[in-house]
Image: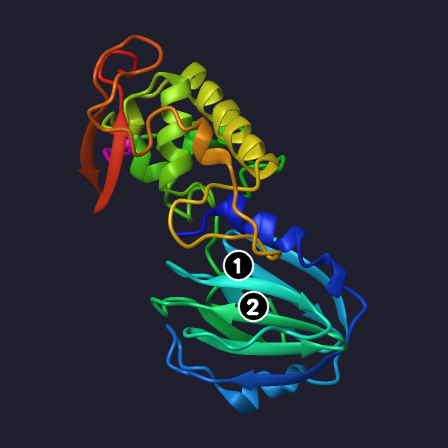
């Protein structure tokens, strides 16, 4: 699943669209997570794009009178083509044409979505989201307060969008490894110093992943069709039964919240 660094990288690769005007919307297969509505998406036509931003794992196209919101789901990919777009392939479900650009949405598993909304305020997709991990509101004091009295494992808590957005499975595993905190520890058991270290490492890992263009494990490519390279820096994610690079012990894999979690039982406690 594309996580915050991947979505941020896609957003950065779409900035040439700012100032262009949506001229048409082509839907080839409407059955995504939420069925695509041609008349709804057509409301974007003849509107100029004033900005493209990200909130959590959502891409937001700011238009003159509304917004287009994309979520990439498990396998969604947004590719930007200038001038002539290539031949349509299987799973190319939607094209949005903006002047001489084509934004093509491909999604083999069809868990993503594209909606048009007149307002972001009180939009149910964006309601109840926690702070962005790379912004000032995400502090050690904030995290410690959120963890207080929580019996839930820390990894599940930092992946909870109501606590902090965008810390997906890969980056939760890597941040906990750098912080020497077991993913199995209960949130309430972390002290303020550990919360401070974890916040710093979440920010470090996400910043480095964005700089590397994200992690390409299965379907992910950026808006120019290029792979990310942060997977080359993974310490524990996807490395079950391999030796820890820090201590030499064997990296373990465990299921937490229906997600595979990877950690070193010696380094992390």
Task: Choose top left, top right, bottom left or bottom right for residue 137.
Answer: top right
**Front-most of residues 235 and 42:** 235
Toward the right, the furthest residue is 19
* Main secondary structure along the magenta-highlighted residues: loop
Label 1–label 2 contact, CB within 8 A: yes
Q: Is residue 170 shown left or right of residue 202?
A: left
Mark closest to the chain's N terminus, 1 or 2 = 1
- Determine the residue positioned at 35% across, 16% down: 180
Residue 247's mark?
none
**Of residues 263 and 127, which is closer to you in this image?**
263
In 3D space, how far apart are the residues under numbered discs 1 and 2 (Cα atoms)? Answer: 7 Å
Provide the secondary structure element on which disc 1 rests: strand
Q: Is residue 238 left or right of residue 48?
A: left
Q: Residue at x 26, y 19 (%)?
A: 264
Where residue 10 sits in the image (x, y, percent)? Answer: 59, 54
Residue 144: x and y, percent? 42, 27
Q: Which residue is mark 1?
A: 58
Does 41 appear above or below 227? below
Quadrant housing residue 223: bottom right
Q: Is residue 89 left or right of residue 13?
A: left
> Label 1 neighbourhood size at 10 Å, few (<14), some (14-19), many (20+)?
many
Q: How is the image coloured?
A: rainbow
* Residue occupying the far top of the picture: 247
Q: Nearer the viewer, residue 25 or 55?
A: 25
Please give the name of the residue rendered at 51% of the width and 53% of the height, measured from the top-left corner.
221
Callout 2: SS: strand
* Label 2, residues with CA under 10 Å away: few <14, some 14-19, many ≥20: many
Residue 104 in view in this figure = yes
Where are the magenta residues, as a range?
149-153
Q: Which of the pair 11/155 is nearer the observer?
A: 11
Q: Which residue is mark 2?
A: 69
């Amino acid at each position: 699943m594309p996580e915050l660094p991947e979505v941020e990288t896609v957003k950065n690769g779409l900035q040439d669209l700012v100032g262009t005007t949506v001229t048409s919307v082509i839907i080839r297969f409407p059955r995504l997570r939420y069925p695509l509505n041609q008349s709804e998406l057509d409301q974007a036509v003849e509107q100029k794009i004033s900005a493209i931003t990200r909130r959590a794992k959502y891409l937001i196209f700011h238009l003159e009178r509304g917004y287009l919101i994309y979520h990439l789901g498990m396998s969604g990919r947004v590719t930007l083509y200038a001038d002539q777009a290539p031949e349509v392939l299987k799973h190319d479900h939607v094209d949005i044409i903006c002047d001489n650009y084509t934004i093509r949405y491909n999604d083999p598993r069809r868990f993503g979505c594209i909606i048009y909304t007149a307002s972001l305020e009180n939009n149910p997709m964006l309601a109840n989201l926690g702070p962005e991990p790379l912004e000032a509101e995400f502090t050690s004091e904030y995290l410690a307060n959120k963890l207080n009295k929580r019996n839930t494992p820390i990894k599940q808590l930092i992946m909870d969008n109501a606590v902090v957005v965008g810390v997906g499975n890969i980056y939760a595993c890597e941040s906990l490894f750098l912080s020497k905190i077991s993913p199995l520890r209960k949130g309430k058991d972390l002290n303020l110093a550990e919360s401070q270290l974890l916040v710093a490492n979440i920010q470090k890992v996400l910043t480095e992943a964005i700089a590397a263009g994200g992690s390409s494990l299965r379907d992910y490519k950026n808006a120019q069709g290029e792979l990310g390279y942060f997977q080359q820096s993974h310490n524990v994610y996807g490395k079950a039964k391999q030796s820890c690079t820090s201590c030499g012990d064997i990296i373990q894999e465990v299921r937490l919240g229906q997600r595979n979690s990877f950690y070193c039982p010696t380094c992390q406690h």
